[in-house]
């Protein structure tokens, strides 16, 4: 009887783990695309964000990342943070009419940023890398869509260029990173935001602090915690049952 109970407890534990892995693990690959974090910033100021790039391939590493800035939402200035083992190149384009920045007319805007890995710095399978930038002044639009190309060591190029629907809806197969822009409130004057030389504005979160952009990681963590607690509970019940003294034969007195 004790052996049967042990077998049942083990089977229940395995079934619980399998269900949790199946539910949460199946959703993981769908969210492993390039994102911008945090996902919100304020119009008119300078935003400090990071482009988060995971490697989805099981056999190849990410060697180059090209982030294209939207033509309908021009940004005059960008500063990049050094990423060890990666070179960076900023391309600019002419804009007409010019942009007005701090009372001056600027005739060029950021067109594209390209990061290229050197040596063994490529993003290996199962890993991700963040590429931080400070940019602005941010345009007075609802969102910025950064169409991105991700190049792998086997020369495969993944094009994250599909614009997600406005206001929600089903996400496309290869969504581009989107930065949502909100209007500055009375307490958030764009003039109070810092310039690229001094860092992010007071209305911006620190780079990489927005874990809300990765709900899958949170789900996996919760799944692991639940599976661990379930295993401990079932194991404890099985141990208690094995420690119970067996009932002796009925008394003859």
Image (cartoon, rainbow, N blue to C red):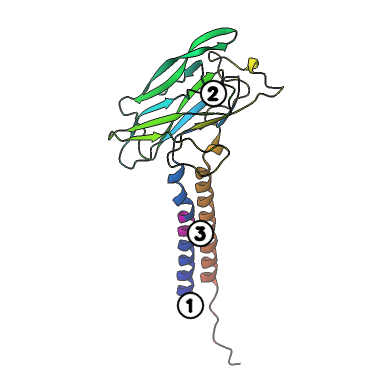
Q: Which residue extends farthest right?
A: 186
Specify which label sits upstream in the sequence, 1 or 2.
1
Q: Disc 1 and disc 3: Cα gap in Å? A: 21 Å
Is residue 79 part of the magenta span, yes or no?
Answer: no
Specify which label sits upstream in the sequence, 3 or 2.
2
- Frontmost of labels 1 and 2 is 2
**Residue at image point 50% right, 37% down:** 164
Is residue 20 part of the magenta span, yes or no?
Answer: yes
The residue pinned by badge 2 equals: 48
Q: Which residue extends farthest front?
A: 97
Q: In this view, does 14 lie above or below 77?
A: below
Q: What is the magenta range?
A: 17-22
**Residue at image point 55% right, 37% down:** 166
Q: Is residue 209 above or below residue 13?
A: above
Quick one: 82 or 8, which is closer to the camera?
82
Quick one: 146 or 82, which is closer to the camera?
146
Residue 146 in the image, given as x and y percentages of width and height: 47, 28
Q: Do the residues labelled 3 and 2 touch (CB within 8 Å)?
A: no
The residue pinned by badge 3 equals: 231
The local crowd at label 1, few if under 14, some if 14 to 19, many if 20 or more residues have their Cα within 10 Å, is few
Q: In this view, does 173 lie above or below 114?
A: below
Quick one: 141 or 40, which is closer to the camera?
141
The residue pinned by badge 1 equals: 1
Q: Disc 3 and disc 2: Cα gap in Å? A: 43 Å
Tag 1's secondary structure? loop
Q: In this view, does 250 lie above or below 120?
A: below
The local crowd at label 2, few if under 14, some if 14 to 19, many if 20 or more residues have their Cα within 10 Å, is many
Q: Which residue extends farthest bottom?
A: 253
- Frontmost of labels 3 and 2 is 2
Q: Residue 90 carries which label?
A: none
């Amino acid at each position: 009887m004790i052996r049967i109970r042990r077998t049942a407890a083990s089977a229940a534990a395995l079934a619980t783990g399998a269900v949790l892995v199946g539910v949460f693990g199946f959703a993981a690959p769908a969210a492993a695309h390039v994102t911008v974090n945090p996902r919100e910033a304020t119009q008119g100021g300078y935003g400090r964000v990071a482009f988060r790039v995971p490697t989805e391939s099981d056999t190849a590493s990410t060697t180059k990342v090209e982030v294209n800035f939207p033509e309908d939402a021009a940004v005059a200035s960008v500063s990049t943070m050094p990423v060890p083992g990666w070179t960076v190149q900023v391309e600019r384009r002419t804009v007409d009419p010019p942009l007005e920045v701090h009372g001056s007319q600027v005739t060029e805007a950021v067109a594209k940023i390209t990061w290229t890995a050197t040596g063994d710095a490529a993003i290996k399978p199962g890993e991700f890398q963040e590429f931080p930038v400070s940019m602005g002044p941010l345009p007075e639009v609802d969102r910025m869509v950064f169409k991105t190309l991700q190049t792998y060591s086997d020369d495969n190029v993944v094009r994250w260029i599909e614009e997600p629907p406005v206001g929600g809806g089903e996400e496309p197969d290869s969504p581009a990173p989107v930065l949502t822009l909100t209007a500055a409130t009375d307490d958030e004057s764009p003039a109070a935001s810092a310039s690229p030389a001094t860092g992010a504005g007071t209305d911006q979160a620190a780079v990489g602090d927005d874990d809300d952009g990765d709900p899958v990681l949170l789900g996996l963590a919760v799944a692991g915690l639940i599976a661990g607690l379930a295993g401990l509970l079932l194991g404890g019940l099985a141990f208690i049952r094995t420690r119970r003294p067996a009932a002796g034969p009925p008394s003859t007195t």
